[in-house]
Structure formats: structure tokens, C-alpha cells
Image (tube, rainbow, N blue to C red):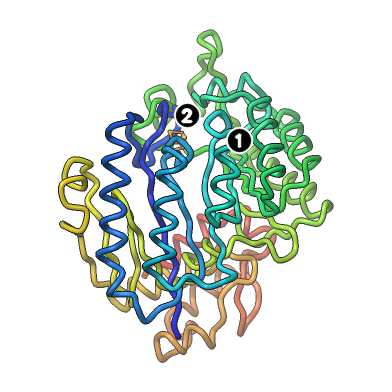
């Protein structure tokens, strides 16, 4: 039997972080209740379509799923288990933020079947957390982490951010050290990207290097060179501690790579439920409405449908697949498209091999240097 993955979007946050351009709305008790009702309806009504598929991973993301009422959220999980064939050993992840969980809610999540937590920490320095507009302190995180362990979570990811305004290499190193000492199974470390429509964009805009506003509590964004030094430092420190660098921004202990995200990078079928949630099913992408009122009115209503062309699929195959350390296999490319990736991309592959950014033949992957210039490499795979 074929399998799918399921993503569930909870779009509420207590406060918008200054760097965030995710689809999230302010939290309110009533709207949250209405949303969970609509979500349940969508999950139930869509079940028939996927009755011949097993579910191998579920990911509850946001927004901040842990701001939702824990009983309401567990009700959603229960419904999912009731309506879909969720595999016995399925990975069921949930994003939580420190400051929004307590021993009781964590135990409820665990009991409901969630077996992997992803904790959005971002930094262990309170001044950086404040700068980012996070609602929690490092101490809140430590409490949440300990409570998660006590509730029985044996698979925990911690999110960290680098290249923050005013952040030095030593600041970043300290955060990494502190997180490593807690021994989470998985660590994601991303560089800050100043996206449009964020508070940070108003401050830094496109001319990020030129702007210095230390007097107002903002530092300069680290240079690209410092950013690369941070990435190299993470690689060195984390691999020394037994974490495998399995994707550009992700490190995991043996057997703890995030199965759900691998589904995205390998372009397997996934179905998204909730506001603005995207799905990829048999090379068709569909996206739920991003309008909350519209979604609440009709959660199985309007969807944007995009049938991907062969060209789209090839591009995605390459630039998503190359994100992973294991890279892409030519035999898989042939299975999908009936021809070798070398017929479509020979020049790009040769050029990047010459520059020391790609390596391999049947299996093509980024080199260590290639990981540092991943965006540059991947952009060339757009046909
Ligand atoms: S908690 Fe996450 S989703 Fe919510 S505003 Fe902050 S970064 Fe965005």
C-alpha cells in the first residue's frame, strides 16, 4: 500500500516575531475554537480520498501549535487516527514554543500519540531572543525541555538561528554549546533571512550590510563570511558530538533525521490541512485558502490547484534533493522522468564539479564547500 504524509497547520501566535513571514494570526480563544472545528471538518471530509494510503508521518506546525487548547488539539489528533490509516511506527511531530507549554499539556500531547517535539528556541541569549521578538527566555526553554523529557519525549529537535543582528561567532558558539550539552536528538540551525513584510525588513531592507543602528538596540547583520564561519563551526561542533549533517540546516543523531521533512525533499506525496496548507499529490500541488474567514466558512472549499509540468518536477527533484547530504540518484531521476539527469543538466553538473561544489556520478551530491554555497548551486538547476 502506498503512503502519504500529513501536515496540519495551526496558524496562531501570541505575538509576531520580528523576522517572521509565516502565515500566522493573533491568538484568540474563540477564533481558535472555531478553527479547530473547521480543521476537524476538513480532516474528516478529505479522508475518503486517501483511504487507500497509509500515513507514515504527521507534522503539526504553525504558527505556534502549542497556543491551541491542548484538549482541542489532541481531539484533532484523535480524529486523524480515527479517519486515516496511520502506521504503527509513524513519526508524529509537533512544533512547540517555550512559554506556551507546561507539564500537563506536554503529557497530553505525548498520550495523544505525538512522539517528536520540535522546540523553537532560536538562541540561548536573552538579549537575542528579545531582539527577535520571541515571547520566551532561555530559562523558559530549559523548563520546557525538561518537562518534555519528563513527559516521555525521546525525540526532540531544537531550532537555532545564526547570522542575527549584532551576533558574534562567540555568541553563536555559546548557544550551540549549551544546546549540545542538553543532548537533543536533532538540531536545526538556520541563518536569519530578512524577508519582506517583516519588522526586520523595515530596519534592514535590502541594504542590510550598510545599516548600523546599534544605538536603537539593533546590531549590524553579520557578513556573509561570518555567516559561513558560523555554518562551518556548527558542522565541526555537531559532527564531533555524533550528529550527522544530513541536510543543509539539519543535524541528527543516528536514526533521528526528520522523516517528515525528508518526504518534502524527496517530493513524496503529502497532504496539508488547515489555513494556507500546501499539498503535493501525484505531481499536483494544491494550496488551501490563506484567508481565515474564508477557511472558517468552508474548510474544504477553495483551493489553488497547480498541475506541475515535467520541467517543474525536474527542477524540484534537483534542488530539493540536493539539500540532503545523500544527494540525488540518477536511477531515481530516470524512474521519474525516463531519462538521465545528465541529459538535462550535464553542463551545470560539469561546471559545479569543476568548481568543487558537486561530487559523484550515479549519486550526485554537494561537497562540503557546496553546502556553503548551496543557494548558488541550486539556482542553476532551474531550467
Ligand atoms: S512563533 Fe514562529 S510562526 Fe509565530 S511569529 Fe514567531 S516565528 Fe512566526
> Front-most of 99 and 317?
99
Q: Mark 2 touching mark 1, by CB under 8 A?
A: no
**Picture coordinates of residue 171, whole percent (x, y):** 71, 28
Residue 367 position (above or below residue 225): below
Most extreme residue toward the bottom, as rendered? 338
Q: CA distance from mark 2 to mark 1?
A: 24 Å
**Picture coordinates of residue 122, whole percent (x, y):** 60, 35
Horizontal side of residue 71 vs 284, given as left or right:
right
Q: Residue, x 32% and y 46% (percent of image)? A: 36
Q: Considering the numbered disc 2 on the image, is that residue within a helix, a strand or a loop?
A: helix
10 Å crowding of disc 1: few (<14), some (14-19), many (20+) = many
Image quadrant holding the C terminus, namely: bottom left
For disc 2, does the CB lie below 8 Å from ligand 1? Answer: no
Image quadrant holding the N terminus, namely: bottom left
Horizontal side of residue 118 vs 64, given as left or right:
right
Please state the quadrant of the image where ligand 1 appears: top left
Figure quadrant of residue 62: top left
Q: Considering the numbered disc 1 on the image, is that residue within a helix, a strand or a loop?
A: strand
Q: Give me the disc on residue 223.
A: none
Q: Residue, x 60% and y 76% (percent of image)? A: 364
- Give the mark nearest the N terminus, 2 or 1: 1
> Front-most of 109 and 179?
109
Q: Give me the disc on residue 121.
A: 1
Figure quadrant of residue 72: top left
Q: Residue, x 50% and y 10% (percent of image)? A: 216
**Picture coordinates of residue 96, whole percent (x, y):** 53, 41
Q: Which residue is mark 2?
A: 208
Amino acid at each position: 500500500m502506498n503512503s502519504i504524509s500529513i501536515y496540519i497547520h495551526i496558524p496562531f501566535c501570541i505575538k509576531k516575531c520580528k523576522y517572521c513571514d509565516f502565515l500566522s494570526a493573533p491568538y484568540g480563544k474563540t477564533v481558535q475554537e472555531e478553527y479547530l472545528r473547521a480543521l476537524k471538518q476538513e480532516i474528516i471530509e478529505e479522508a475518503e480520498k486517501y483511504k487507500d494510503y497509509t500515513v507514515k508521518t504527521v507534522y503539526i506546525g504553525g504558527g505556534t501549535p502549542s497556543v491551541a487548547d491542548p484538549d482541542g488539539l489532541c481531539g484533532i489528533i484523535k480524529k486523524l487516527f480515527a479517519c486515516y490509516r496511520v502506521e504503527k511506527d509513524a513519526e508524529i511531530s509537533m512544533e512547540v514554543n517555550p512559554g506556551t507549554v507546561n507539564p500537563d499539556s506536554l503529557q497530553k500531547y505525548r498520550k495523544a500519540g505525538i512522539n517528536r517535539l520540535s522546540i523553537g528556541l532560536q538562541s540561548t541569549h536573552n538579549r537575542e531572543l528579545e531582539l527577535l521578538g520571541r515571547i520566551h527566555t532561555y530559562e523558559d526553554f530549559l523548563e520546557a525541555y525538561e518537562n518534555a523529557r519528563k513527559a516521555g519525549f525521546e525525540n526532540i529537535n531544537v531550532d537555532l538561528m545564526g547570522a542575527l543582528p549584532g551576533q558574534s561567532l562567540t555568541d553563536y558558539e555559546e548557544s550551540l554549546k549549551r544546546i549540545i550539552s542538553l543532548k537533543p536528538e536533532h538540531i536545526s540551525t538556520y541563518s536569519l533571512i530578512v524577508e519582506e513584510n517583516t519588522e526586520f525588513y523595515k530596519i534592514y531592507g535590502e541594504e542590510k550590510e550598510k545599516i548600523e543602528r546599534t544605538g536603537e538596540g539593533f546590531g549590524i547583520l553579520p557578513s556573509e563570511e561570518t555567516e559561513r564561519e558560523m555554518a562551518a563551526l556548527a558542522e565541526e561542533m555537531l559532527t564531533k558530538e555524533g550528529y550527522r549533517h544530513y541536510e543543509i540546516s539539519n543535524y541528527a543523531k543516528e536514526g533521528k533525521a526528520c522523516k517528515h521533512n525528508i518526504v518534502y525533499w524527496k517530493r513524496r506525496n503529502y497532504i496539508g490541512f488547515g489555513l494556507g496548507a500546501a499539498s503535493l499529490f501525484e505531481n499536483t500541488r494544491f494550496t488551501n485558502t490563506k484567508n481565515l474567514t474564508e477557511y472558517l466558512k468552508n474548510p474544504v472549499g477553495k483551493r489553488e490547484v497547480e498541475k506541475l509540468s515535467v520541467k517543474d518536477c525536474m527542477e524540484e527533484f534537483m534542488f530539493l534533493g540536493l539539500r540532503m547530504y545523500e544527494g540525488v540518484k540518477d536511477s531515481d531521476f530516470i524512474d521519474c522522468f525516463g531519462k538521465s539527469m545528465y541529459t538535462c543538466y550535464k553542463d551545470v553538473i560539469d561546471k559545479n564539479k569543476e568548481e568543487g561544489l558537486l561530487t559523484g556520478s550515479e549519486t550526485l551530491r554537494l561537497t562540503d564547500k557546496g553546502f556553503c554555497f548551496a543557494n548558488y548551486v541550486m539556482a542553476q538547476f532551474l531550467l
